[in-house]
Amino acid sequence: MNEASKTMLYYSGLLDPIFEGRSILDIGAGKDPIKQDARIFDLEEGNAEDISLYGLGKFGCVFSSHCLEHMTDPVKALKSWWDLVETKGYLVVIVPEENLYEQGNFPSIFNGDHKATFRLGIEKSWSTNSFDVIE
């Protein structure tokens, strides 16, 4: 089961109201978009870090699951993704928590393409490229 399918299995009650009636851009979906009618943007379409360069327009919801950790500059990527969200729309981003996924190893021993780690409200990190989601 891919990431979006797992997400909908566990969180459809939370996400369905966000998705309902909105256009959806799924960044990093691969072959498993969060919804069947979502527009997919993945490696074949270009660099998600500079997604604003592709003239995609605006979406009611921009969704990304397990893609942000592959960006060399996650802050730049998030700003670019936010620019694609319509007024009163949503940006939904799912990332692995560094202690649960990376388990103190960076670069990752589980995914050699991870360029960043993420923590939630923890002041200090063992990772050399860690971002606090709250900040």
Image (cartoon, grey):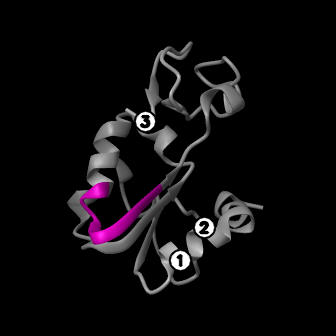
**Mark closest to the chain's N terminus, 2 or 3:** 2
Tag on residue 17? 1
Q: Which label is found at residue 134? A: 3
- Amino acid carrying mark 1 in the image: Pro
Which percent across, then down, holds residue 55? Answer: 22, 69
Residue 134: x and y in percent read 43, 36
Q: Residue at x 61, y 40 (%)?
A: 96
How far is the residue under mark 1 from the one under mark 3? 23 Å
Which of marks 3 and 1 precedes in the sequence? 1
> Which residue extends farthest right?
1
The residue that appears at 45% across and 36% down in the rendered structure is: 133
Q: Kindly check if marks 1 and 2 are in contact, taking CB atoms under 8 A apart as contact.
A: yes
Compared across the picture, whether 77 is left or right of 109 comes to left
Find residue 1 and report its horizontal and vertical position in percent. 78, 61
- The amino acid on which the numbered mark 2 sits, given as a three-letter code, is Leu
Query: Element type at marker 3?
Result: loop
Query: In the rendered structure, are the residues bearing label 2 and label 3 in contact, judged by CB atoms less than 8 Å apart?
Result: no
Query: Looking at the image, do the residues carrying marks 1 and 3 touch, with CB atoms under 8 Å apart?
Result: no
Task: Check if residue 83 falls in the magenta segment.
Answer: yes
- Coordinates of residue 5 in the picture (x, y in percent): 70, 66
The magenta stretch spans which residues? 82-92
Check the picture and name the quadrant holding the C terminus.
Answer: top left
User: Which numbered tag is attached to residue 129?
Assistant: none
Decide: is 23 above or below 125: below
Q: Residue at x 70, y 31 (%)?
A: 100
Q: Label 2, label 3: how many angstroms apart (C-alpha)?
A: 20 Å
Residue 51, image quadrant: bottom left
Q: In the structure shown, which secondary structural element does the residue marked by tag 2 occupy?
A: helix
Residue at numbered disc 2: 14
Around disc 3, counting alpha carbons within 10 Å, would you say few (fewer than 14), some (14 to 19), or many (20 or more)? few
Q: Residue at x 57, y 63 (%)?
A: 30
- Give the main secondary structure of the magenta stretch: strand
